[in-house]
Image: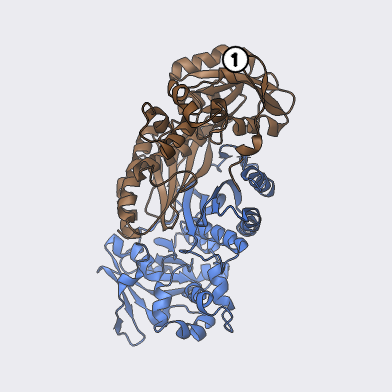
Chain colours: A blue, B brown
């Protein structure tokens, strides 16, 4: 399948049907009509072979779906609604046709699940497989949540459970057949962007700051607090951990809390909220059917600090959290 | 330089100053306010090491600039105005800091020249260097030019000159020091997106279809005609060729017309326009200070056909034009 054939195949598969898509795949650019009084929200993310995934442990279809999940998660973390995707795929020439077909099936799965349309794309030959996904979304007026609004005394909340994805990656890399590991693996392969929760905490003015956890709780909490001159205290005993994580993580690392705190790729929402909004947070959790746990508080002093169940501070070597260069 | 440091460096360098950028680099997503009654135009493009460029012949700064040129060219080819960029860079960990710094200088050069703002980005480690650039632009209402509007009898026009970029690539690959080759090389390294021409032919309703030439005249003319059930006749003698191209191309290929017709990466605009708009086309050329040449006509029968100055048809093996897989 040549590039033109592949693009035609994709254009057919992703034919846009909404009236807001004045031009989808098949021209120099997509042309899109935004809803009245909305702002455009735009974000771009990349998955690279050997860094973010390995071709042996992730099928092209899973890769396509994951790229969509990761992309819409960034839009959701602003409290916005994802609407459109532009996808660039780099893959090796040999077997590219089959790869592209399977990959696009995964993108299609994601588009259907999260109600977004692929409106643009690009295919390149590349020795290293990569996917770049740009997500475009909409948010009404000021109805969004930035990373910058946390205040001293705010509670720190997280959706779902932490560490499953990091555990899943370890299972995939060393013991893919292990009993009971399926949930962790599937959370790594197919993370769940928390779009409904993000939207609702934004609409209801509950969150003062918000981010989706991609680099791990520690790194992403730093972005909400330390980088803004604030700090955080986290109770390790309050971290939401899945049954799968509790039963298997000790086999793959010495300190299971460290894995939950630094593992990354959870794609759960991490947000701060004033104490008096506690009931409103619980209401969002109930309405969305997603657990939301309070794991600590924002402090005036800089730095993210961890405390065990006995109230003793636990020190981590934070240098190990940096994953680039 | 770690990823966070690099992102901070980029956030500082690309601090958005326009009031339409409600949030630029530094949050989960960029948040942008579009002008009233405009549609969003979005496009994404990738440059891959070993496929679109070689690290030995293109500096990181040149690469950054070129990625901007290529991205805004796609927006210009709709007759739209490019406004924002999101850039994903994949580069090897070793030396990444310096690479990123130089690369971002090139992006900055491009942003300044074409009056666009980098509002989002992403850095990844990758064994193969790649750049993905998503461009967002605006167009008022229906004031745009698609690929699909050509009609039988329309003239076929092209801006600037053809083949310089392809010649430049050959010079870079085999004989970079050759006398007089600088223009061709610079056209390959730093193509000129024809934004003003694109905008003006759209505003004045001159063009029935338009595309920017990235895959070569033949391929891109096929997209405007054959793919829509039409054909094209091109007079090889009318192809606009630069002095540099005329004096050097014969040393690098047997058939200089073939190079001009199939070389690609010209980033000139190719458009169709009814015969009665000929004077209006000349007016655009004059106002923008860019040569616009009529090279042929749209025909009813399918296929792109070439004729030499004597009126004899010239046959090319079109299979060689496909560059993927």
* Vertical arrangement, residue A145 with respect to residue B167, above or below: below
Q: Nearer the viewer, residue B122 or B49?
A: B49
x, y (%) of residue B74?
A: 51, 36
Question: Among all residues in the image, which is located at the extreme right?
Answer: B301
Between A294 and A260, the one nearer to me in the picture: A260
Residue A209 position (above or below residue A157): above
Residue lying at 58% horizontally and 83% vertically, measured from the top left: A180
Label 1 belongs to which residue?
B277
Is residue A207 visible in the rendered image? The answer is no
What chain does badge 1 belong to?
B
Label tally: 1
Q: Position of residue A197 (x, y in %)?
A: 52, 64
Horizontal and vertical percent position of residue A96:
61, 54
Residue A102 is situated, as x and y percent measured from the top left of the image, at 65, 58
Q: Is residue B102 visible?
A: yes
What residue lies at 32% left-to-right and 43% top-to-bottom? Answer: B105
Task: Report the side of B162 relative to B3 (left or right).
Answer: right
Identify whether B79 is placed above or below B53: above
For residue B144, above or below residue B129 = above
Callout 1 crowding tier (Cα within 10 Å): few <14, some 14–19, many ≥20: some
* Camera-nearest residue between A322 and B310: B310
């Amino acid at each position: 399948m040549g590039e033109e054939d592949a693009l035609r195949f994709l254009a057919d598969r992703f034919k846009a049907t909404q009236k807001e898509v004045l031009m989808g795949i098949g021209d120099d650019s997509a042309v899109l009509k935004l809803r009245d009084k909305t702002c455009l929200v735009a974000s771009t993310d990349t998955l690279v072979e050997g860094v973010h995934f390995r071709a042996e442990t992730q099928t092209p279809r899973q890769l396509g779906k994951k790229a969509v999940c990761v992309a819409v998660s960034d839009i959701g973390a602003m409290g916005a609604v994802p609407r459109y995707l532009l996808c660039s795929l780099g893959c090796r020439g040999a077997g590219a046709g089959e790869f592209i077909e399977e990959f696009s099936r995964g993108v299609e799965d994601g588009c259907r699940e999260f109600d977004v349309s692929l409106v643009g794309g690009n295919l390149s030959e590349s020795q290293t497989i990569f996917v770049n996904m740009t997500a475009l979304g909409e948010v009404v007026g000021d109805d969004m949540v930035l990373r910058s609004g946390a205040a001293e005394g705010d509670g720190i909340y997280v959706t779902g459970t932490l560490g499953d994805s990091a555990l899943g990656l370890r299972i995939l890399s060393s013991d893919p057949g292990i009993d009971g590991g399926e949930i962790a693996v599937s959370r790594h392969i197919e993370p769940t962007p928390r779009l409904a929760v993000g939207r609702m905490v934004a609409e209801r003015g509950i969150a003062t700051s918000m981010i989706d956890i991609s680099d791990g709780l520690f790194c992403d909490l730093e972005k909400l607090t330390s980088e803004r001159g604030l700090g955080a205290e986290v109770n390790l005993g309050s971290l939401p951990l899945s049954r799968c994580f509790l039963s298997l993580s000790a086999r793959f690392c010495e300190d299971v809390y460290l894995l939950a705190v630094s593992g990354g790729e959870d794609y759960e929402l991490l947000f701060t909220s004033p104490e008096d909004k506690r009931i409103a947070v619980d209401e969002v959790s109930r309405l969305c059917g997603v657990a939301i746990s309070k794991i600590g508080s924002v402090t005036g002093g800089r730095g993210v600090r961890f405390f065990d169940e006995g109230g003793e501070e636990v020190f981590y070597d934070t240098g190990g959290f940096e994953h680039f260069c």
